[in-house]
């Protein structure tokens, strides 16, 4: 098995999620991006508990492209403190090769 990275974030609108996904793939920072349905998030913000509806975006990238992807997501993200999670995962070698090939400039 080979490793890839899954970078995950959430945003407050489907249109924002779509823009983040398209920019990452077009820029070859992610081989693909998936926008997931609405999720309800509950969290602490400014001394109180908040609940909001968000859209999840999951990007698949090569480990050597993850830092650049994170920087792009952070720069384009509408939140003051965005949730950006990076997870290394084992992948089928053929899929890992595909991800690697499609994240080259």
Image (cartoon, rainbow, N blue to C red):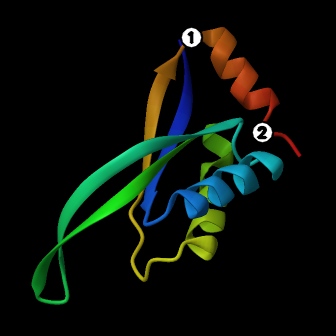
Q: Position of residue 55 (x, y in %)?
A: 43, 54
**Contact flag, marks 1 and 2 (Cβ < 8 Å):** no
Front one among 56 and 28: 56
- Residue located 31% across and 61% down the image: 53
The image quadrant of residue 94 is top right
Going from the N terminus, do you reach mark 1 or mark 2 first?
Answer: 1
Q: Secondary structure at mark 1?
A: loop
Query: What residue would you read off at disc 2?
Result: 103
Q: Position of residue 24 (x, y in %)?
A: 71, 52
Image-based side of 100 in relation to 5, left or right? right
Q: Position of residue 47 (x, y in %)?
A: 11, 88
Q: Position of residue 60 (x, y in %)?
A: 59, 36
Q: Where 17 falls versus 65 (above or below)?
A: below
**How many numbered callouts?**
2
Residue at the farthest bottom position: 46
- Residue located 60% across and 60% down the image: 15
> How many angstroms separate mark 1 from mark 2 (CA)?
17 Å
Quick one: label 2, few (<14), some, or many (20+) residues within 10 Å? many
Q: Secondary structure at mark 2?
A: loop
- Residue located 63% across and 11% down the image: 93
Image-based side of 64 in relation to 85, left or right? right
Q: Which mark is residue 60?
A: none
- Residue located 45% across and 77% down the image: 79
Quick one: label 1, few (<14), some, or many (20+) residues within 10 Å? few
Residue at the farthest right position: 105
Q: Where 61 falls versus 90 (above or below)?
A: below
The image quadrant of residue 17 is bottom right
Q: Where 5 falls versus 26 (above or below)?
A: above
Image-based side of 50 in relation to 78, left or right? left
Front one among 14 and 95: 14
Query: What residue would you read off at disc 1?
Result: 92
């Amino acid at each position: 098995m080979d490793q890839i990275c899954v970078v995950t974030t959430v945003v407050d609108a489907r249109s924002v999620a779509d823009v983040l996904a398209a920019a990452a793939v077009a820029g070859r920072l992610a081989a693909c991006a998936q926008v997931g349905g609405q999720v309800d998030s509950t969290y602490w913000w400014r001394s109180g508990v908040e609940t909001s509806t968000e859209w999840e975006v999951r990007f698949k990238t090569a480990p050597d492209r993850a830092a650049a992807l994170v920087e792009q997501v952070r720069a384009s993200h509408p939140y003051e403190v965005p949730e950006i999670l990076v997870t290394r995962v084992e992948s089928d070698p053929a899929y890992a090769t595909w991800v690697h090939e499609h994240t080259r400039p």
